[in-house]
Image (cartoon, rainbow, N blue to C red):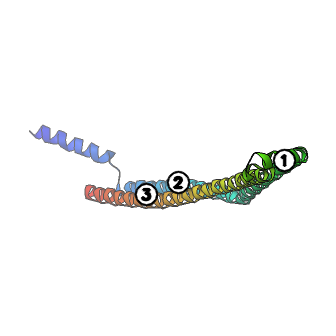
Amino acid sequence: MSSNRQKEKEETEKLKATLPTEAEKKQIENLAAEKNKEVRENINITLDETKSSVHKTTEEAKKQIPQFTKAMNEYQEESIEATRDIAENFLESQKQAINSYQSFWVPYMENVQNTYWSYWASPNRMTENYTRAVSNITNSTIASTRLANNFMFASMEAWKTTMQHARNNAIEFSRLNANYAKAYQYTVRDSLREYQR
């Protein structure tokens, strides 16, 4: 029995010899604290660089907004000008065609009209009706362009609202994630304190 006690005592002495001293424990704790601080600083530097990169990218995107606005304005102006040019050219060609045909057909048609047809079939009345129809088509085209532009702006407003909601949600998720990380940190710290006692 004494030999068993002797062996236990020897093993305990060996174990004590392999365990770090209080000074070594302090040194290990200091090294671990320094390493944690270094890791934390590296993480913060990396996150700050990423944040800076995102800031730079968004600033570059903001600088392009005037170009997009200018392009949008040019598109609208071009659409309106093109509609006007199309309508004016079409009306001018119709005017020339009508004048050509009227100079030849009006006397004949009025003679026929006076003999057989009522007033609504006169070339002048037909020309007025045709001109009104072309004017209505032109007005409808301009109105359609205006509707398309309004739809485009409404879509842009909807996108703006969607982006604002996405921003708010991302901020909230980040806040929740940070709170979760802090709670986890406190739980681990408390568990380690309990373990070390």
Task: Determine whether label 2 and label 1 are within 8 Å by CB.
Answer: no
Instruction: Tell me the SS state at disc 1.
Output: helix
Instruction: Tell me the SS state at disc 2.
Output: helix
- Of 104 and 192, nearer the camera is 104
Identity, as a three-letter code, of the amino acid under mark 1: Asn
Identity, as a three-letter code, of the amino acid under mark 2: Ile
Instruction: Residue 111: give its label.
Output: 1
- Of 60 and 116, nearer the camera is 116
Task: Give the mark, 3 or 1, whose residue is nearer the N terminus.
Answer: 1
Is 36 placed left or right of 147 in the picture? left
Identity, as a three-letter code, of the amino acid under mark 3: Phe
Residue bearing mark 3: 173
- Of 20 and 170, nearer the camera is 170
Residue 128 higher or lower than 6, as above or below: below
Work out how far the residue at label 3 is from the one at label 2, CA to CA, in angstroms: 20 Å
Work out how far the residue at label 2 is from the one at label 1, CA to CA, in angstroms: 97 Å
Residue 1 can be seen in this image: yes
What residue occupies the far front of the structure in this picture?
A: 115
Is 118 placed left or right of 192 in the picture? right
